[in-house]
Amino acid sequence: MESHIVSYQDNYIARLLSEQREIPFVSVKVGTFADSESYVVLKHEERLREKFIILVHQFSLSEILNDQIMKLCFVADFIKQVGAHKIIAFLPYLPYTRQEKSFCEKYVGPIKLLSDYFMCTGIESVITCDVHSLQIQNISTFKLYNISMAPFWSEVILSFVQKNNIDTKNICIVSPDEGGIARVHALAQLLGVSAAHIDKERKFPDCAVPLKLSGTVDGLVAVIVDDIVDTARTAVQAAQLLLDSGALSVIGCFTHAVLSEGAYKRLENSAFDKVFVTDTLCANLPMFKHFDEKISLVSCGDFLTTQVGTLLALNFSV
């Protein structure tokens, strides 16, 4: 079946996927009325009728996430009404995956409602990367395909240690919490190195306190790997804990650079020797233009589009 890539933003990952897979790219306009309501415009919408649609969106740090989600749903619903055969979404960063449960942990979190929104608008499957919690698969109504960033981070780490004359055997991959243990062990296995994790307690939203280290980093270069860096408080405290535990230095690798207010300066002033973040989110905030030697933005576009291409071929015959 003929497929098309659709996006209401001109993001480079959508263009790259279009070029790599030789799939036509269709740009949809989402405008705003004077009262702030949104509307969708697509010329020659018949192009999408009976087509397999890959809806690509990179969430932006300069626009409210909830507004972007609603626009994405409006576009998907429009495509469904046009008569698309099937719609899947490729969202490198998927919001609300940290909220599979309510904060009091008594009820289902808003990710369930988000998945219901997607299904109602015609999005049957979502492709993302380094999802925070795979547990959302148990409550989501859409089919979730999660791309592991372990091979990508393996290359970044190997390049860094070689450039800095560090013996690979002298590094330890560390998860800043229990939730990332599986992710860290997968990466450690790829590199053939040891792994450790930090136990922490979340006292209230956006504030977690590292408690103790499980494993050893004494005399090693510790590499903290996590899916999201948001306020950076946990990451910064974890880096200090690792130094206090005997680590020679601490490196950070974070897939989704949310970097809410104050996070960048916390990282700059932290015990990290080096921090790497990727561009799964649109890197259009001023801070991204001023990364220094300590904090580096590494592009994962080629890696992601290659992985998505393989996934599409295996699961959707695209």
Image (cartoon, rainbow, N blue to C red):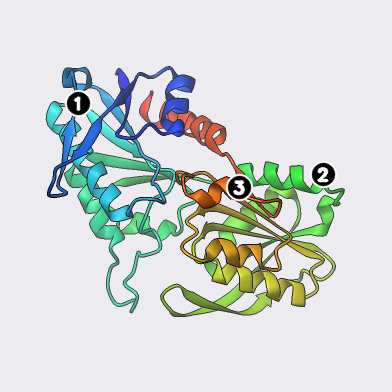
- Residue under the image location 30 percent in, 59 percent down: 111
Give amino acid for label 3.
Ala
Q: Using the rendered view, name the quadrant where residue 89 is placed.
A: top left
Q: Which of marks 2 and 3 is in front?
A: 2
Bin the neighbour count of mark 3 within 10 Å (Cα to Cα): few under 14, some 14-19, many 20 and up: many
Q: Which mark is residue 150?
A: 3
Say which residue label 1 marks. Answer: 42
Q: Nearer the viewer, mark 2 or mark 1?
A: 1
Quarter of the image for the N terminus: give it: top left
- Residue under the image location 75 percent in, 42 percent down: 159
Q: Where is residue 232? Give x, y as percent.
A: 55, 66
Whichever of callouts 1 and 3 sits on the residue coming sooner in the sequence is: 1
Q: Is residue 183 above or below residue 55?
A: below
Q: Where is residue 258? Give x, y as percent.
A: 47, 56
Look at the numbered disc 1 and give the secondary structure of its residue. Answer: loop
Image side of residue 15 versus residue 194, left or right: left
Q: Where is residue 82? Give x, y as percent.
A: 14, 27
Say which residue label 2 marks. Answer: 162
Q: Nearer the viewer, mark 1 or mark 3?
A: 1
